[in-house]
Amino acid sequence: MPDPRTDQPATRVPSAGARTVLITGAAGGLGRAFALGFAAQGDRVVVADTNLEGAQQTVALLEAAGGTALALQANVTQLGSVTQLAADASAFASDGKIDVIINNAAIYATITRSPFEEIDVDEWDRVMAVNLKGPWLVTRACSPYLADGAAVINLSSATVLSGSAQWAHYVASKGGVIALTRVLAKELGDRNITVNAIAPGFTLTEASYGLIEGAAEYGVDRGSIKRASEPADIVGAALFLAGPGSRYITGQTLVVDGGRQFL
C-alpha cells in the first residue's frame, strides 16, 4: 500500500484475519490519508463519504496497491444512513466485526467566518450536525458490531485550546467532540473498547490550501517544530491510538500540532 507521506507502495497486503477499519469523510484529504495508512498495515478499509465518486477513487488507490477496501455512500447526520453503513461494514468484515472507527467527516473549508452574532443559524445547525452529531450517530450505529478491544477515534481540533475568532460554530462543535469522547470512553470501557480524540493543528490538505493563502507557512513560527503539519503526522497518531501500544489509553485527546499549544 502507498505510504501516506510518500505515496510509495508498501509490501504488506491484508490477510484473512485483518482488522476492519471504518473511516468517514474519506473521499479525500485527511480521510484518504487515514485510509492509505491503515491499508498499508494490512487492514481492510471501509471508505465512507457523501461523495461516492471520491470514495470510489480512494478505494481504487488502495486496490491498485493490493489492498482490500469498500466504498460506501453515507450521510453521518442521518440515522438510517449510518445504520446501513454499519451493517454494510460488518458484512464486509472477515468476522463481522468492526475493529476501528475513525470519525473524520466534518464541515471545515466551506464554513463562513463571521462574528458570533452574525453566524447563519442554518449553517450553525449543519456544522453541529456533521461535526458533532455525526460521530455520535456513527458510533451508536456501529456499537453492536464493535469487536472486543475495538478503538474509536474522533477528530477534534487544536483550535479548541485557543479559540478562533469568527469561527464559533466550528470550535464549539470540535469542543463537543472532546466531551463526547470522554462519555463514550466511560460507556464502552467495560467492553474493552477505547475511545480517544485527535486534535490536529492546521494541516496541509486540499481543503487547507484552498482556505488560507500561503498555507504551507501558516502558523509555523508559533510551533516548537518549525514546519507545517502533513497528513502523515495525523495518520501516525491514529495508527498509535488504534494499535496495541495504546490499549490502556482512553478518554484522552492527543494534540498533534507541532507544539504550538499544550493541553
Image: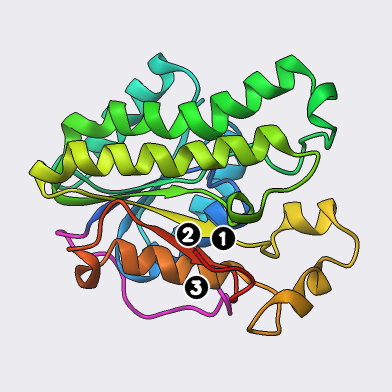
Give the residue at x 59% y 57%: 158
Q: Is residue 160 above or below residue 52?
A: below
Quadrant of the drawing holding the N terminus = bottom left
Residue position marked by numbered label 2 in the rendering: 34
Residue 22 is covered by the magenta coloring? no
Instruction: Please name whichever residue, 169 or 103, is drawn nearer the observer in this view of the structure.
Output: 169
Local packing at callout 3 (Cα closer than 10 Å; few below 14, some 14-19, many 20+) is many
Q: Callout 3, which amino acid?
A: Pro
Q: Which mark is residue 167?
A: none
Q: CA distance from mark 1 to mark 2?
A: 13 Å
Circle 1: element type: strand
Q: Callout 1, which amino acid?
A: Pro
Q: CA distance from mark 1 to mark 3?
A: 22 Å
Residue position marked by numbered label 1 in the rendering: 200
Q: Earlier in the sequence, mark 1 or mark 3?
A: 3
Question: Which x, y percent locates residue 24?
Answer: 47, 41
| First to last magenta residue range | 3-18
Q: Callout 2, which amino acid?
A: Phe
Q: Which mark is residue 2?
A: 3
Q: Nearer the viewer, mark 1 or mark 3?
A: 1
Give the residue at x 81% y 68%: 218
Q: Residue furthest right?
A: 213
Give the residue at x 56% y 60%: 200
Question: Which x, y percent locates residue 212?
Answer: 85, 57
